[in-house]
Image (cartoon, helix red, strand yellow):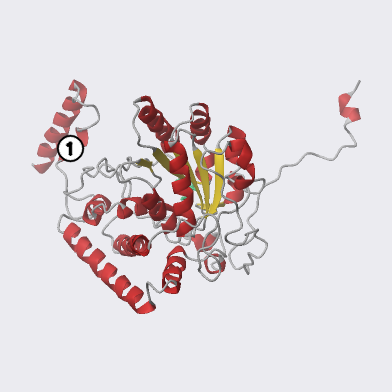
Amino acid sequence: MDQNRERRNLPPLNLHVPEPRFRPGDTVDFSGLDIEAAGTTRRPDETASPADMRDMAYGLVRVLDDEHRAVGPWDPRLDGETLLKMLRAMALTRAFDERMFRAQRQGKTSFYMKCTGEEAVSVAAAFALHHDDMCFPSYRQQGLLIARDWSLVDMMNQIYSNRADRLQGKQLPIMYSSKEASFFSISGNLATQCPQAVGWAMASAAKGDTRIAAFWCGEGSTAEGDFHSACTFASVYRAPVILNVVNNQWAISSFSGFAGAEATTFAARAVGYGIAGLRIDGNDPLAVYAATKWASDRARANAGPTLIEHFTYRVEGHSTSDDPSQYRSVMESDEWPLGDPIKRLKRHLIGLGLWDAERHAAMDLELAEYVKNCAKESERNGVLGHGLHQPLDTLFEGVFEHMPWHLREQRDQMFAEWEASKK
Ligand SMILES: Cc1ncc(C[n+]2csc(CCOP(=O)(O)OP(=O)(O)O)c2C)c(N)n1
């Protein structure tokens, strides 16, 4: 049989190439987004079987309603003091971002990345975790360090690659590492932290410890093979780990459709692996807190991992090297229907009678001043381009635990050439 003849009446095959809804200059209308009202999503027991909570992967856990009241079964009922601390940590994260972005524009550092609009994803999660639970972040969870009261000056020293940089200028700015804050070294290679977090959680369980692990990756990063490995190992061994997917709609200039968002949700990835999945309003600090607490209680009860999709929006450019007006409508961030996480918590606290606009404005001024003073302190240790900040030979340290002969040879050769160049 001639198969070519048989197929001659079939339409030609073609591929679907996703296209974002709005491009530069387009009027943005997000009314088509399916966003359910706050308080309507059910709250399963922390030990529920993944099969009994598949609907959660397609819903949207929300606590703060349009009037900024906390409603529904996911309301974590936090006390006012904790809520105010959370608000402050989110505002401090934003103030830090503002200052460091400007430092890059002033040439004091080569690079910076903001997390504007995503402050709740890291800060509220840090409040729900124990201080020594191990975090495996991407480059957009600086709020974890800030919520854990890590030194801003230390973070800035790293950004400036100066003489007080504990990473000795070896890492790109913002690729922090703090063992003391249980904050795993950030790697430029996307999604590598995912299987590493699962492995850490497995080790914690193997040792009979009570600490859990959590990773954060962007929705774009879920397209990496490492994300699949992480989900498989987490599911098979029921590792005490929280898999956070921060769906901020964009991976540099690629919209979430290129990572699979047109066909399903990112929380629904959990369904295929038999993992508990929660899809939550990532701009709702109370929802982030409640979901993280749920997942950590689940992990600590040996009931298995949880994959949380934080539905949010990347308000600013991808990094200081990016200009988002080249690929998306500038209206998008203003039109984003889930609002701003800091403003939402602020209005919630005002509604509770615990806060007001004047105190908020005063706090913003105080935080900006505090960040400025930290920057001044850090800049005394040097900024980019002001000479060599680290002794040259530190370049060869840490490659191996003990420096092998061939690295010593290269180091000596470098010094010899350096001396010769001065003559
Ligand atoms: C393995 C790998 N591929 C590509 C890159 C280049 N890169 C850096 S950030 C980024 C986009 C990541 O987007 P997403 O995971 O959605 O996180 P977001 O930046 O939105 O927080 C890409 C492609 C990289 N760093 N590593």
Q: Residue 309 in the image: state x and y as whole percent.
A: 53, 48
Q: Residue 326 in the image: state x and y as whole percent.
A: 53, 61
Q: Residue 150 in the image: state x and y as whole percent.
A: 26, 52
Query: Of all residues shown, which one is farthest toward the bottom?
Result: 358
377 horizontally vs 292: left or right: left
Name the quarter where the N terminus is drawn.
top right
Using the rendered view, name the quadrant where residue 419 is placed.
Answer: top left
> Measuring 54% from the left and 67% from the top, which residue is drawn there?
330
111 horizontally vs 54: left or right: left
Vertical position of residue 49 compared to residue 358: above or below: above
Using the rendered view, name the quadrant where residue 353 is placed.
Answer: bottom left
79 horizontally vs 1: left or right: left
Disc 1 residue type? Thr
Residue 37 visible in this rendered orientation of the protein: yes
The one of 209 and 134 positioned closer to us in this rendering: 209
Assess disc 1: are there few (<14), some (14-19) or many (≥20) residues with their C-alpha within 10 Å of its C-alpha: some
Vertical position of residue 167 compared to residue 274: above or below: below
The one of 103 and 82 positioned closer to us in this rendering: 82
Give the SS element for disc 1: helix
Residue 191 visible in this rendered orientation of the protein: no
What is the count of numbered marks? 1
Using the rendered view, name the quadrant where residue 267 is placed.
Answer: top right
Vertical position of residue 261 compared to residue 31: above or below: above
Name the quarter where the C terminus is drawn.
top left
The one of 12 and 67 positioned closer to us in this rendering: 67
Vertical position of residue 158 compared to residue 366: above or below: above
* Residue that label 1 marks: 394
70 horizontally vs 152: left or right: right
Q: Residue 68 in the image: state x and y as whole percent.
A: 50, 69
- Note whether ligand 1 is within 8 Å of mark 1: no
